[in-house]
Image: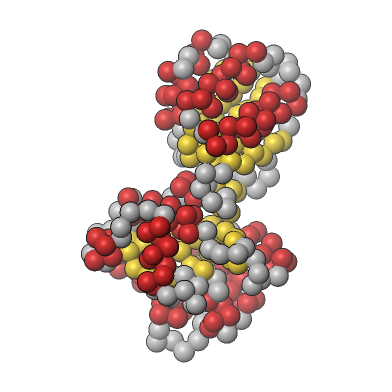
Amino acid sequence: MAGEQRRHGTLPVQRMRSGDHAFCRYAARPAWELVAAYVWRGLERGERVVVCPAPQTGPDEARTRLEENGPSLDLVCARGQLEFSSMRRLLHPAPRYTTARQWQRIQEETEKALAHRYSGLRTFSDMHWIADLGADLEEVLAGEANAAHLFTARPYSEVCAYNTAAFEPAVLDAVRAAHPHDLLEAPGMLRALHTAGRVRLIGDADLATRADWLASLRKAFTGGPPEGRLVVDLSRLYFLSVGCASDLLNLATDARHRRIEVRLDRHQAGLLVRLGSHYLKHVTLIEDRDS
């Protein structure tokens, strides 16, 4: 599955970790539920979080939108763990954008977060700032593609959000390719990636997505040589319900595959074991320690 190794490819936002650099796109309006999930995941991990909304969106409005998709932010804002800022403010007092200045400031803010005993720094940036600052698009794209050094030590993570109405499709394709990860459009979605002998499920497998879950699994179980090996990769699921886990085991029970490997995290493995996966001798659970 080219380009879909553990450290590259599509993720649900809740699976983002320190050291991840991700692209997301939105159409009519920012996906505030995605931003809220990203912000609260960082706060729970003890990270300092900086949100840079579109320049036309003030900090009060951004905070209101986040609180519509989560609890009150009074405490985390008061203690400085969450800040609403902007690229203009980040770059100050530099009179214009340069990649070097951006990188310098990110490194300084990361060190500042660590000095204040946060576990790291996590930022969300709406890329409308490019037009607002009159920045050179080619310079920004080159910076996006060559920013790996900011993330190598893993105390920093970043989501870059691009409005599809503000950027040409070719630009969006280029910037997506420049990021190690791209995000599902919102929490609560399920996406399936099929290749020969393998299916990767990304997002949430629950009552709301169960029809798609079943359809994807059935396609995988019937799409290849039944006597061969099938890999069912759940390592990028954020949530697996009991009902969906049971669906998987029911389909595996009747499958004619010689071996079914299920790649998953320890919580998912524990659920499948409790549901009786160990009675299916052709099913092997492989825990992904890096998920």
Left or right: residue 86 versus residue 137 is left
Question: On screen, 101 above or below 22?
Answer: below
* Quarter containing the N terminus: top right
Question: On screen, 3 above or below 125?
Answer: above
Q: Residue at x 34, y 68 (%)?
A: 83
Expressed as whole percent of the image width and height from the top left, the position of residue 278 reads 49, 13
Q: Out of 101 and 267, give the one closest to the viewer.
A: 267
Expressed as whole percent of the image width and height from the top left, the position of residue 62 reads 42, 67
Q: Residue at x 54, y 82 (%)?
A: 132
Expressed as whole percent of the image width and height from the top left, the position of residue 170 reads 73, 66
Q: Out of 196 and 40, give the one closest to the viewer.
A: 40
Question: On screen, 244 above or below 37?
Answer: above
Q: Residue at x 69, y 62 (%)?
A: 173
Expressed as whole percent of the image width and height from the top left, the position of residue 12 reads 52, 47
- Residue 116 in view here: no
Left or right: residue 27 versus residue 70 is right
